[in-house]
Amino acid sequence: MTTRNDQIERYTGSQRAAHWVSAISFILLALSGLALFHPAMAWLANLLGGGQWNRILHPFIGVLWFLVFARFALPLMGSNVITGGDLKWLAQVRRVLAHDASGIPPVGRYNGGQKVLYWVLLLGMLVLLASGVVIWEPYFADRFPVDLRRIAVLAHAVTAWGLILSIIVHVTASVWTAGSLTAMVRGKVSRAWAKHHHPGWYREVG
Amino acid sequence: MALQSLDIERRSATTVPPPGVRTPAQVAKLIDISKCIGCKACQAACLEWNDLRDEVGVCHGTYDNPTDLSAKSWTVMRFHEAQTADGRLEWHIRKDGCMHCADPGCLKACPSPGAIVQYANGIVDFHSEHCIGCGYCLMGCPFHIPRLSQEDHRAYKCTLCSDRVAVGLEPACVKSCPTGCIGFGSKEDMVHVAAGRVAELKERGFAHAGLYDPQGVGGTHVMYVLPHADQPELYSGLPKDPTISPWVQLWKGIAKPIGLAAIGLAALGGFLFYVKSGPEEVHEESEAGPGGPASPGGAQPPAGGR
């Protein structure tokens, strides 16, 4: 962060590691969860070694995801407070997607879409953790009344569905926004990238 | 136990029709509660035929032993004493176990292909080698019947002796019953037998005697003759109008196709958006400035991606 042509650090090494551990966990969770959700996806259970292994590993990967994601995301909470400018950004997201964002308030470290994703993931993860514990065989499920387990398993499925959709949007947006993937793999972005996508943040760190 | 001689009507987590060229008679077990003396011969016969040895429990001061179903006790007698309006004692003894629903909640909930099947004759059977131990069948069942083994993490319940029935024998409990309280045959015949017994009970003063064949689960292949059919709860909590829980219906019904379709469409939509719209690229030269931020009024397309 010194000379003009230097790149700016956007994510530290441990943040990147945490992001990718939670990304891999999420993919494994989504695939093993879909195997339990729909018969058409049941073959995915083979990914983790068959039905029994799928059932055994899914919740443990879930806890790993919770811990790593929480470690990664909680320190970023301050950068994800939704402001009036973010609401304007969200209201005009169509223009952003059409490569035309004139007149939209300058974006800070994260834009409105990223902040919404942040809160959806964080809250969704808490619902998944709580409902997942309630239906976790053989350790916890028999401690809860069966009607609560029925509600929990539905909440788990619906929330997971919401998060999978959110992650599809997240992946699409990060591939579409050239340079983002590099930011999360190598940790650095160009000054031009920062000024273009996150001028408010650039003003602070550039 | 996969039995080739029994055709399959429904198979868990399977979207294509299971093999079923034959149309065998629907079978049923009829338990006449008014004839039960609580001897537990059926419990012993069940353990013996299925070669199960449950842990020897302790006396809880009641006749219930074991006090509940388990992965190794697929049927138990439930004893309940009640006082009638005129001060007499009534002893309600109910042989509890799988009801073999025509619309089985366990099968509907099961995520493992072929772990639960419904044979064409109506028997609902667990193929434990395919069971993954998730406990979904416990949530699907409206009668609280299946139990997960803590030893092998698979669910178990009464098979209605599908192995015996397949070769033309009656279930072991039926064979052992000394009072003729448990009958077995075609469902049609059992309904007929029950009607005769209900008429007898009504003559003897049980005005609300009736057959328990709950239609909320499509009828069952284990039915009870109840002296007080208007109050099935009297018999150790037999549910009055059992149905598959609406939560389970939602989860295993509409949520499945909608969830999968939305995920597929979102993935396709994201890909097509990228293909049509192209990446949002930043050109170094156009953005290069003297280290300061872009002017607030200028073009600043802020976009997604972390």
Image (spheres, rainbow, N blue to C red):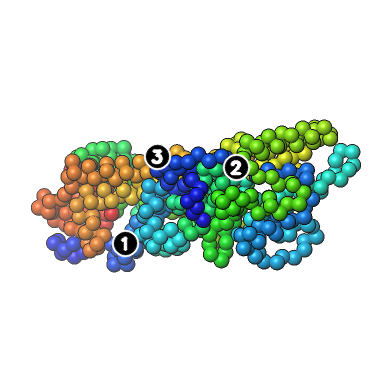
Which amino acid, by three-letter code, is at mark 2?
Val
Assign the C terminus of chain B to one quadrant of the image.
Answer: bottom left
Q: Chain under label 2?
A: B
Residue A136 or B92: which is nearer the viewer?
B92
Residue B188 or A154: which is nearer the viewer?
B188
C-alpha span from label 1 to label 3 = 29 Å
C-alpha span from label 2 to label 1 = 56 Å
Q: Where in the figure is residue A199, as x and y percent of width and height?
A: 23, 51
Mark 2 or 1: the one toward you: 2
Which amino acid, by three-letter code, is at mark 3?
Ile
Q: Chain under label 3?
A: B
A83 sits to left or right of B230: left
Residue A91 or B36: which is nearer the viewer?
B36
- In the image, which disc is placed on residue B215? none
SS at mark 1 in the image: helix
- Look at mark 3 in the image and give the residue it sits on: B258
Q: Where in the figure is residue B230, as x and y percent of width and height?
A: 74, 35
SS at mark 2 in the image: strand
B107 sits to left or right of B208: left
SS at mark 3 in the image: helix
Q: Are discs 2 and 3 both within one chain? A: yes
Which amino acid, by three-letter code, is at mark 1?
Trp
- Look at mark 2 in the image and give the residue it sits on: B27
Badges 1 and 3: C-beta atoms under 8 Å apart? no
Image point (43%, 45%), residue name: B19
C-alpha span from label 2 to label 3 = 36 Å
- Look at mark 1 in the image and give the residue it sits on: A20
Q: Where in the figure is residue B114, as x and y percent of width and height?
A: 46, 51
Badges 2 and 1: C-beta atoms under 8 Å apart? no
